[in-house]
Image (cartoon, rainbow, N blue to C red):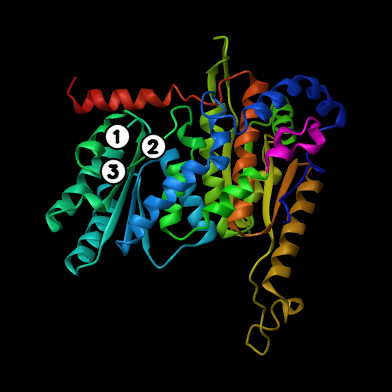
Amino acid sequence: MKQIRSSFDHATISSHEINDLQARLTPEIGRIKEAWAAGYATEYASLSLSSDTELLGRVMAHARQAESLNPRMVIIIGIGGSNLGTMALLQALGHTDRSVHFADTVDAPYIQAMYDQAEAMLEQGDEILIIVISKSGSTTETIANAQLFAALLQKHKKEYARNVMVISDEGSPLARIAAQHSFSYLSIPQQVGGRYSVFSAVGLFPLAVMGVDIVALRSGAESMKGACTHETLYKNPAALRAATLYQLYQKGLYIHDTFAFSHALYGIGQWYRQLLAESIGKAETKQGASVHVGITPTTSIGSVDLHSVTQLSLAGPANRVTTFLTIAEQKDISVPSGTAFDSLVPMIQGTSFRMIMQAIVDGTQKAYEYAHRPFMTIELPELSAYHCGQLLQMKMVEIMYLGFLFDIDPFNQPQVEWYKKETRKILSHE
């Protein structure tokens, strides 16, 4: 099986700068290697998800039960780490004819339109499935939407429990509600944080219901173990990416743009945005010293954003590094001839769109070279569950190494709780 490929030829980091971090990273590489598939007792718990056969069995059993309903509409109720991985993979890989919607906001017009569509389906006798996902079990937006759609199901179905799946931590308030009302329930390992949970039931269950090959997805993730725990940085793409980002940050490059040259991969850029921002943006080191570090993640789509942000990227402040994300092989079409537009760009007659896109990618990278703007590349051999699994796993391990280099905790997000607490105070009229 072909593997994803990474290139660092234009990262503008010297071998000396990378070698300076080799000894520093070696103990952390050892810790990650030991933690991989060692269970859920440590902060590296997410590494064990892709090899957990019991988890796969539980997810597949519940997915078959949900599929027996033959739901025409699936509503995934969750926010952030509870839905971004699923959203990204469904965008990348496609899904069955079932309609899928993400209730990840309390924007009333947006949710009302979703509600109206769900009610119309129920009124004509179709089934819908709601999947309520919250690690804590008390996320305000998630519970508001869960109440709304549960009420809708109660309105139209006497026995609606089989239309509800709950995914949460063991013992959470949401898990207790699931038990009380006989909702289907899958747990999240306590040590697996939301943004690292895509290979847990959080991602696997809705993906399986929507027809994604979760076995191949997990296999791809697990296949990265050897590469991402290799002791030599130059043979370890996750550690090398982390080292590169860290060294560039020391030089004032505080922005990391994921430039995906495929609409299918844009959602993965959005998923990575949370992963990088929430994991690395920290006020304190592990020892409690004030640091206020962080890399700002942005996402661009090629070739669309060559006509929106590239002028800034090439001529503006030299404060960003770019990762170009591409796919080697995918479906193709060609430019026809014999139309009124033939003379406008004559060199493209009969040329495949893939060749045109590759020329644009190559031309863009040349422009970045001329402007002395650093970039890395990641190429997927093809768009498949296996290779998406590889990519997401590599990215999560990259962030673990990056957190180690910054000496911050890449698994917590203490400041996110601030808005939640203040929101509850306001709603409680405190």
- Residue designated by label 1: 175
- Residue designated by label 2: 187
Q: Secondary structure at mark 3?
A: loop
Q: Residue furthest bottom?
A: 338
**211 or 394: nearer the viewer:** 211
Q: Residue at x 65, y 22 (%)?
A: 404
Whether residue 250 sits left or right of residue 277 in the image: it is right
Q: Give the foreground label among 3 and 2.
A: 2
- Residue designated by label 3: 106
Looking at the picture, which amino acid does disc 2 mark? Ser
Q: Residue at x 32, y 64 (%)?
A: 70
Looking at the picture, which amino acid does disc 1 mark? Ala
Looking at the picture, which amino acid does disc 3 mark? Val
Q: Say above or below: 344 vs 178.
A: below
Q: Position of residue 24 (x, y in %)?
A: 76, 19
- Between the C-alphas of marks 3 and 2, the distance is 25 Å
Q: Position of residue 64 (x, y in %)?
A: 38, 57
Lower position in the chain sequence, tag 3 or tag 2? 3
Asked if the residues shown at circle 1 and circle 2 are in contact, with their CB atoms under 8 angstroms apart, the answer is yes
Asked if the residues shown at circle 3 and circle 2 are in contact, with their CB atoms under 8 angstroms apart, the answer is no
State whether residue 358 appears in this view: yes
**298 or 16: nearer the viewer:** 16
* Quadrant of the drawing holding the C terminus: top left
**Residue 386: quadrant of the picture:** bottom right
Q: Position of residue 188 (x, y in %)?
A: 42, 35
Residue 234: in magenta span:
yes
- Between the C-alphas of marks 1 and 3, the distance is 22 Å
Disc 1 residue crowd, few under 14, some 14–19, many 20+, Cα 10 Å = many
Lower position in the chain sequence, tag 1 or tag 2? 1
- Which region is colored magenta? 224-239
Q: Give the foreground label among 1 and 3.
A: 1
Asked if the residues shown at circle 1 and circle 3 are in contact, with their CB atoms under 8 angstroms apart, the answer is no
